[in-house]
Every structure is written in structure tokens, then in C-alpha cells.
Amino acid sequence: MPILDWINGEYIPHLLDGFLNPQKRVSLLYLSIAAALAIIWSVYVSRGSVRKGFLTARDKLFSQRVWFSHSARGDYKLLLANHALLLLIAPLLLSKLTATTALFFFFIDIFPSGAAVLSSTSPLLVAIAYTISLFLLDDFSRFATHFALHRVPALWAFHKIHHSAETLSPLTVYRTHPLEAVIFSFRAIVVQSSAISIFVFLFGSSVDLVSIYGVNAILFLFNVTGSNLRHSHIPIGYGRLAEHFLISPAQHQIHHSLDPSHYDRNFGAALAIWDWIAGSLCKSRTDMVLKFGLTDRENLQSQKLLYFNFSPFRELFDRGGNDPFYRNRNHRNLTKNAV
């Protein structure tokens, strides 16, 4: 049957690739390192008690209350459904090659004398500059997109699906509405095609990425230093000074917090400097006790696949309705309580 051929030939390999490919954030390599870091951190905060630290990590990271909770089952539903949907619509989306080619020839038409003007630059310097530029552009675009998803009511209606998670695990990163997944895919294409076309235009065809296992070296370091613990109950903080520059797992957990003082904080992906500049930075504390999710009324339905897919459209149709959480999430002063 054609559908079985598609499942076996495309869907399952594409799904497994997310866990086997080091270019993917939830690859088994990064998940294993995250688990090790969680245990080390738990031993550290347990004042060196290996047994107590291991039990703490087991309870917060490996517990059935996390992986088999009602909320976690919602994560799995969206993971499976979104992979299928995005695989089906991928041919309809703008490709990185098409966008890069179009931008390159646009630059040629506008600035014909500037083509390959820096082609004599050392390939190593070009590779380093390209790697850093791509990382910074990608990280800022993630911050800007995330900021818009919270501050624009029409976009928050879709992004709140991600924030409906009551328990956090590395797979919560896949807890997104399909439309939000398309938005982030488009963001990635715009960023990558822009960086590639600009560097090829300026430096010629000898533009390489400093990479580890085919991954941007800086992004690789981000992934191996606990990026998957951002969606977890392991509150690893980097200290008050470092958290001005880097978003720690604890800071992203603050971003998911139900505490009103934490609303619209820590939009950044890897770098905290964007939040610092925008006044949305909130540093972690060792005594934090966080609760995640949306309002009680919403959470009664928020783990159902039909709710995930259709509630944003209903909310937009109702123009926010009488949902106070919807209004509060979009009418707060970002600079208030910033630290």
C-alpha cells in the first residue's frame, strides 16, 4: 500500500534521523551528555553525595512522572503528528538553495563591482568569520522570532501550545503548533540563505563552516553543554555574571514558569545578551521552585491533539475571548522587574 511505503520509506527514517543525526538537537549523543551533566550537577548540589545526587537526577530527569505524564503524552502526539505534516508540506516550502541563489543574484545586480571583492582573504579567516556570523545571526533571529511569538497576540495564540507543557523533557522542544514549526523553518531558511549568499558574494566560492560532525562548532558546543536540559526539571544555573551573556537551562525554565514575575522573560536561545539589551533578562536563583503550564481551565484540554491544532484558530476568531491569561501574556511591561 502507498501509505505503508511512505511510512516505511520516508516517515520513519525522517523521524529516527532526529535522534541519530548530530545536526539535530535531540540526537542521542546530546541526550546522553545531558543525562551525564544532570547527574554531575545533582551530585554537586547534593554536596558531593553521589547516591543522593543520582537519586535526585533520577527523580527529576528519568522519572515516570516526567516521561509518562499527561503533559509528556501531549509532547509525543505533536512530535509524531508534526513530523508527518512537515514531511508532506516540505516540497511546498521555500528551499534554502532557491533562496540563496535568488539573494546571490540580487546582490550581483545591485552591487556588480562588489562581487568577490574580498576573495584574497585567508580561507581560515573566512571560515571563522562565517561560522561566528551565522551563529550570531541565527541566535538573534531565534530571539526576535520568540519575542514576536509572545508579544503579538495572534502569534501567542499558537505559541501558547508550547507553554501548555506542565512537565518538561527534552522532547518538549517538539511541542509546537504546526504553524509555529513552519515559521521557525522559514526563519532558518532566511537566516542561512542570507549568510551564505552574502559571504559567497563577498569572498567567492571558498566559504566553509568551522564544524564538528557537520554542525556549526559554536552550536555544537551549545548542544553538548546541556541545551537539552532547558526543557527539564534540572535547574542548572550559570551564575549571575555568566547569565548576562548565556542562557542557562534554569533561565529557560523561568521562561516557562507560571509565576507572573517570570512572564515574557528570557526569550534567548543560546545568548542572553539580546534579553539583557531588551530588558527581558531574568537570572536564576538556587532557591527557585517553579510550576509550569497555562491556566487550570486551559490545561483541562491542553494535552489533546485536536486542542493543539484548532484552539489557536478558535481563539483568533474569538479575538481572545474572556481568557485573562491571553490578555496578560500580551500586555505586560517588559522592563518591569527586569534584573
Image (cartoon, grey):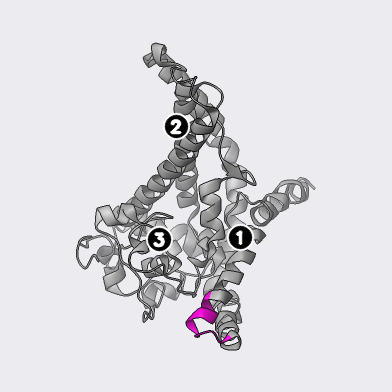
Where disc 2 sits, the SS reads helix
Dot 1 lies on which element?
A: helix
- How far apart in space, not on screen, are marks 3 and 1 (Cα)? 17 Å
Q: Is the residue 223 above or below the residue 202 in the image?
A: below
Name the side, left or right, on which 108 lies relative to 317.
Answer: right
* Magenta stretch contains residue 247: no
Rendered image: mark on residue 194: 2
Amino acid at the residue labelled 2: Ser
Asked where in the image residue 31 lies, by quadrant, the reply is bottom right
CA–CA distance in space, label 2 to label 3: 25 Å
Res. 30 mark: 1
Magenta span:
41-49
162 vs 310, nearest the viewer: 162
Left or right of residue 159, residue 119 in this image: right
Residue 44 colored in magenta in the image: yes
For residue 33, side relative to residue 203 (left or right) = right
The x and y percentages for residue 24 are: 60, 52
Q: Which mark is residue 247?
A: 3
Percent from the top left, x then y, of residue 213?
65, 47
Q: Earlier in the sequence, mark 1 or mark 2?
A: 1
Q: Residue at x 51, y 79 (%)?
A: 44
Above-or-below relation of 260 to 140: below
